[in-house]
Image (cartoon, rainbow, N blue to C red):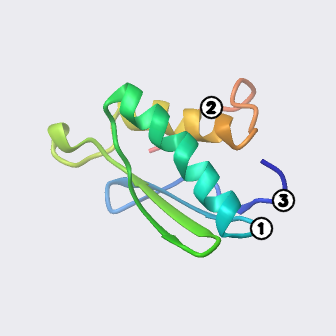
Amino acid sequence: MENVVQKQWEEIDKKLYKVLVFKDFQEAFAFMLKVAFVAEKRNHHPKWTNEYNKVEIWLSTHDAGDIVTEKDRNMAREIDEILGIDTTLQPGPQV
């Protein structure tokens, strides 16, 4: 996905957090749809919000006490791959 303004993943309040700003609502929604298919396949669903072209994502594992686990780091990497970020050259989100 081109022309996406985004912050790196960061841990805030025991959750991985990322904010993205897309060109418009349609691009933001298309991104969310792609993530939804991955989340359903992994049975690991993010908390997220969408307002026009802005998407905010929070990842944590509810079954582990609502903390960041390897499941969340893997999901974050998959989201980065959807965004076209080469995750093979960088470590996953740090906690």
Query: Relative to residue 6, is residue 64 depicted above or below?
Result: above
Q: Which amino acid does label 1 sit on?
A: Lys
* Residue situated furthest bottom in the rendering: 51
**Residue ID at (27%, 41%):** 61
In the rendering, which numbered label is found on residue 91? 2
Q: What residue type is labelled 2?
A: Pro
Q: In which quarter of the image is residue 44?
A: top left
Tell me if residue 20 can be seen: yes
In the rendering, which numbered label is found on residue 3? 3
x and y, in percent, of residue 79 in the image: 58, 40
**Residue ID at (15%, 45%):** 65
**Figure quadrant of the C terminus:** top left
Q: Quadrant of residue 25?
A: bottom right
In the rendering, which numbered label is found on residue 89? none
- Looking at the rendered structure, the secondary structure element under dot 1 is loop
- Looking at the rendered structure, the secondary structure element under dot 2 is loop
Q: Which of marks 3 and 1 is in front?
A: 1
Tell me if residue 94 can be seen: no
Earlier sequence position, callout 2 versus callout 3: 3
Earlier sequence position, callout 3 versus callout 1: 3
- Dots 3 and 1: beta carbons under 8 Å? yes
Query: Relative to residue 32, is residue 94 depicted above or below?
Result: above
x and y, in percent, of residue 58 in the image: 41, 56
**Residue ID at (33%, 62%):** 13
Earlier sequence position, callout 2 versus callout 1: 1
- Dots 2 and 1: beta carbons under 8 Å? no
Q: Quadrant of residue 52?
A: bottom right
Mark 3 surroundings: few (<14), some (14-19) or many (≥20) residues within 10 A = few
In the rendering, which numbered label is found on residue 23? 1
- Looking at the rendered structure, the secondary structure element under dot 3 is loop
- Dots 2 and 3: beta carbons under 8 Å? no
